[in-house]
Image: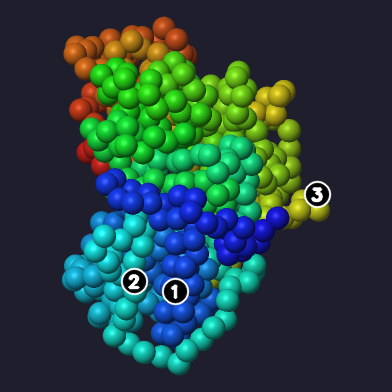
Amino acid sequence: METTLKALIANHSGDLPAIGAPGRDWLSYDGLRDLTQEVAKTLNGMGIDARDRVAIVLPNGPEMAAAFMTVAQAATTAPLNPAYKEEEFAFYLEDLNAKAVILPEGDDGPAHAAASKLGMNIIRLSVPKGAAAGAFTLSADKAAAPSDREPAADDVALILHTSGTTSRPKIVPLLQSNVAASAQHIRESLKLTQADRCMNVMPLFHIHGLIAAVAASLSSGASIWCAPGFDALKFFGWMKEAQPTWYTAVPTMHQAILTRAGRNADVIADTKLRFLRSSSASLPAQVMVALNQTFGAPVVEAYGMTEAAHQMACNPLGAGAQKPGAVGIAAGPKMRIAHETENHLIEGTGEVVISGPNVTPGYESNPDANAKNFFEADGARWFRTGDQGAFDKDGYLHLTGRLKEIINRGGEKISPLEVDGVLLDHPDVAQVVTFALPHPKLGEDVAAAVVLKEGSSATEQDIRSFAAAHIADFKVPRKIIIMDEIPKGATGKMQRIGLAEKLGLAEGA
């Protein structure tokens, strides 16, 4: 098994297409290899080596994909969301202790302002006129003593922050060996070959797009076609141009794609996807079935998180091997169930734990978080995922939800995912997210935000009555909010924690 990003793609060369984008020529594997060498030479000449941290603030697209893959072969990468404000950039850049930041040529926005105030080296990325997708050059004002230390397996390749929804975000360092292992796990799960082409619509400051779409594709000699982000209105036009064999997305993206699928039946018929992949949040069973029927291809749901360099479980490929409502079988690391408060493994329902070569060695400078989230048992070091679930008799993992998102209604524990599944069976419901609503006596009660299908006139009472006919009374949402769109995070996921506050429902609940 390859243990560095450099080793991961070293065997692929020649005129095979590596990276593409709308309206651009393809960057070949030879072109990517030459770019990697040039980037390493440039960074080393700036005094940047394997242990130095380089933040990358670039828009989604082929240059961001290529920058991650090339910079990570010479230094430690830290991709940041280009939509951050100056205060956020200042926090993340300082928290990361970044030595330099890569910005597009001519960008003098909030990232530039924050980096300038911190006295950081600002590296400019420019794209030569007529260059192939992903090709770029780097330049910087500051010089330093040259360095030429290449990354080893135990050096950090990628640093990301946890979401920080309920507390200060934690720094997750992922080693070269972690990233390489995860890319290979995904490659094997999806049986990727040189004939495959992934159309990436995921943000490339997030583990899902970086590893599942980009690194896994390039590790197999396959192609990656990079959209400038997700846009449901442009998705099928991109699909027609890219001619992918697969794409990967979060459930809300898949749902948006389904709403426009009917009017794009000709594109779907001409594209012939080998499979579709979903990850980063639980895919409702109804959506998996609808995607399968619409595209005539397997829908592979996977289970991933940042601390695992993305993939932990995956539904197998093959007709009938996917279980709607399950996130798959172990697909890389070992997976078990642990007691939720005690450090030992159990059978039945509990907290999902993992152990394997793709798992981070631990949060940076956070001994309390490491003591809370890692433990030793049965000769292995286990990481607590924070998810509650159980394995069925066939080894498929079924998640109940995030432990922090389980609703405690006066002592009754309610899975938001279960309520989601019931409400999605209502013929007029297109999207739903169930969440905890503060309650003065019960502590928490059940609420749900709902998006109706186009043309529907269903009311809150209609949906509550439907729910009452299918689940116990204590699980029926006390409040249902019908919305045009449910608020989502930067990666397209619906966020349950804090939704009551965001919708103004916390006070006087």
Residue 262 shown left or right of residue 34 in the figure = left
Q: Which residue is mark 1?
A: 38
Question: Where is the N terminus found, in terms of image quarters?
Answer: bottom right
In the rendered image, residue 417, in percent from the top left (x then y), is placed at 46, 27
Q: How many marks?
A: 3
Circles 1 and 2, Cβ within 8 Å, touching? The answer is yes
Marker disc for residue 378: 3
Of badges 3 and 1, the one in the foreground is: 1
Nearer the N terminus, badge 2 or badge 3? 2
**Label 1 crowd bin: few (<14), some (14–19), many (20+), radius 10 Å:** some
Q: CA distance from mark 1 to mark 2?
A: 8 Å
The three-letter code of the residue at mark 2 reads Thr
Nearer the N terminus, badge 1 or badge 2? 1
**Which residue shows up at 44% across the image and 16% down it?**
293
**Label 3 crowd bin: few (<14), some (14–19), many (20+), radius 10 Å:** few
Q: Which of the pair 147/278 is nearer the observer?
A: 147
**Label 2 crowd bin: few (<14), some (14–19), many (20+), radius 10 Å:** some
Circles 3 and 1, Cβ within 8 Å, touching? The answer is no
Marker disc for residue 137: 2
Tell me the element at label 2. strand
Marker disc for residue 219: none
The three-letter code of the residue at mark 1 reads Glu
In the picture as drawn, the residue positioned furthest to the right comes out as 379
Q: CA distance from mark 3 to mark 1?
A: 46 Å
The three-letter code of the residue at mark 3 reads Asp
Q: Where is 346 relative to 160, above or below?
A: above
Question: Where is the C terminus found, in terms of image quarters?
Answer: top left
In the rendered image, residue 283, in percent from the top left (x then y), is placed at 46, 29
Tell me the element at label 1. helix
In the rendered image, residue 483, in percent from the top left (x then y), is placed at 22, 27
